[in-house]
Image (spheres, helix red, strand yellow):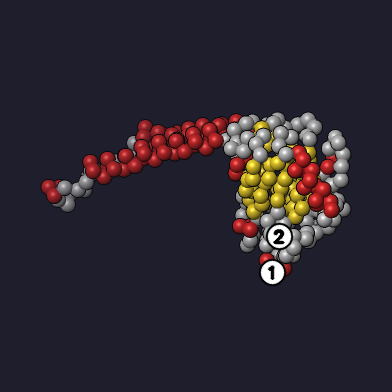
Amino acid sequence: MGDLWTGSWIAALAVGVFVWGLIGWAGFRYRRRKRDGEVAPRQTRYNLPMEILYTLTPLLIVGVLFVFTVQTQNKVLAGAEGSTAGVSGPQGGSPDRVIDVVGQKWSWTFNYRESQTASGGTDVWETGTINASPDLYLPVNQTVRFNLTSPDVIHSFWVPAFYFKMDAIPGRPNPNTFDMTPTREGVFIGKCAELCGTYHSAMIFRVHVVSEEEYEAKLAQLEEAGNVGTNYGSRAYVEPDLAPQGGEAEGEGE
């Protein structure tokens, strides 16, 4: 992803310098001189070779960027390495952990589906509000499968340090799914990358990549707090002053 981003900027800069150079050259070369008087410069109405060049060049640039974009997208979906958070790991197979991510106006709910893992366990969840951003915990060096859903409008789950984002789309029988394996501990910021309404900018969350011991401790903490089962945010938050203040989810539990 970083290579695609860098390559796109280099291509854009090269095209920009070329175009700016032509504009500067044309402005200087064909500037009006006193000796020209009121005589207009020679007008050129048609130049078929130049028109073909002007048409094919942008198509070529867009085509090349399209090919590299598709190749990069396939690598990212397959879990190719290269993010600043050290995320890697191919999609498919049996993940170590499963987390259902719910994007809702205007926060996130994270359902830790421990019952779907090989070791089994109790499902727990954590939700945020407009007033309180939620925290997503991931165990380091373990493959996590994310299932993205939404009860209201399209949101986009984005962690810039992971070099990855994917939409959470309402009304789909099968959620968007991807796998990743964080290989470096740390705290990273996530956000919604899809303009989803008035308080879109409030959809911030923190990602904590921690040891397995810390991860298990977090799940135990949620269980002790009574956040047992799943929560898919069946009722969206409407206004900030109506959002719960204590981090309590406004939705249905199972």
Q: Is residue 61 found left or right of 37 in the rendered image?
A: right
Q: Nearer the viewer, residue 208 or 198?
A: 208
Q: Is residue 172 visible?
A: no
Q: Is residue 136 found left or right of 72 in the rendered image?
A: right
Badge 2: few (under 14), some or many (20 or more) residues near its Cα, within 10 Å? many
Spot the residue most to the bottom. 241
Q: Nearer the viewer, residue 12 or 190?
A: 190
Q: Upstream in the sequence, badge 2 or badge 1?
A: 2
Q: To which residue does mark 2 refer?
A: 129
Total numbered labels placed on residues in the image: 2
Residue at the image point whose x is 69% and y is 31% from the top? 89
Q: CA distance from mark 2 to mark 1?
A: 11 Å
Residue at the image point whose x is 37% and y is 32% from the top? 49
Which numbered tag is attached to residue 241?
Answer: 1
Position of the N terminus by quadrant = top right
- Quarter of the image for residue 140 reads top right
